Image (tube, helix red, strand yellow):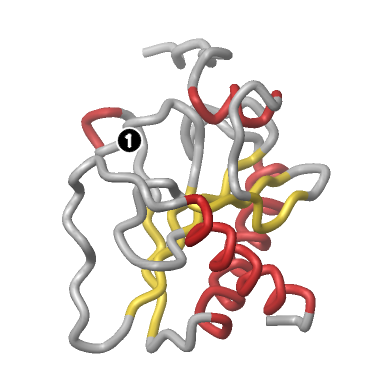
Amino acid sequence: MPAQAYDETNIFARILRGDLPCTKVLETDAVLAFMDIMPRADGHVLVIPKAPARTLLDIDPGSLATLIVEVQRIARAVKQALVADGVTIWQFNEPAGGQEVPHLHFHVLPRWNNVELRPRTGATDKPEVLIALAEKIAGALATGG
């Protein structure tokens, strides 16, 4: 079965082009990390490649290698900045696998002992909350977190 074409109108492509805003945590030549506006936990970050890849199965290995290094850096910074007990990394492929946005992305979720993830309700966090969390995480990145 041939791979589907990349959809340039997906929400993450629009964010990458600057058509839609986001609360940035990190931006490099290859990767963008930003706060999830419907977080399942305080500090929920999305990490995406700038390369137009729909899934983990579509991206070229070099871009994937760069991306996963940044996912690890973000995970360490999230854990440090938010004094989390652990971190959950989610990555879904294709609708049958749970993927909702057809652009490769990793969810980085800080976790605390005995604290469940919030249910998905569609509610968005206030911009000021996302900005404060992004600043904490970016601060941890700056110090090697």
- Image coordinates for residue 91, horizontal then vertical, percent: 39, 49
Q: From the viewer's perspective, is 89 left or right of 31?
A: left
Q: Secondary structure at mark 1?
A: loop
- Image coordinates for residue 9, horizontal then vertical, percent: 53, 13
- Image coordinates for residue 79, horizontal then vertical, percent: 50, 80
Q: Nearer the viewer, residue 52 or 84?
A: 84
- Marker count (numbered): 1
Q: From the viewer's perspective, is 17 left or right of 74?
A: right
Q: Which residue is mark 1?
A: 99
The amino acid beneath tag 1 is Gln
Does residue 124 lie above or below 54 as drawn? below
- Image coordinates for residue 139, horizontal then vertical, percent: 71, 75
Q: From the viewer's perspective, is 125 left or right of 137?
A: left
Quadrant containing the N terminus in the rendered view = top left
Does residue 61 lie above or below 89 as drawn? above
Which residue extends farthest right? 29
Q: Residues within 10 Å of mark 1 (few under 14, many from 20)?
A: some
Q: Residue at x 47, y 33 (%)?
A: 55
Q: Residue at x 35, y 45 (%)?
A: 124
Does residue 133 lie above or below 57 as drawn? below
Quadrant containing the C terminus in the rendered view = bottom right
Q: Quadrant of residue 52?
A: top right
Q: Residue at x 33, y 65 (%)?
A: 41
Q: Residue at x 76, y 43 (%)?
A: 30
Q: Quadrant of residue 122?
A: top left
Does residue 34 lie above or below 132 as drawn? above
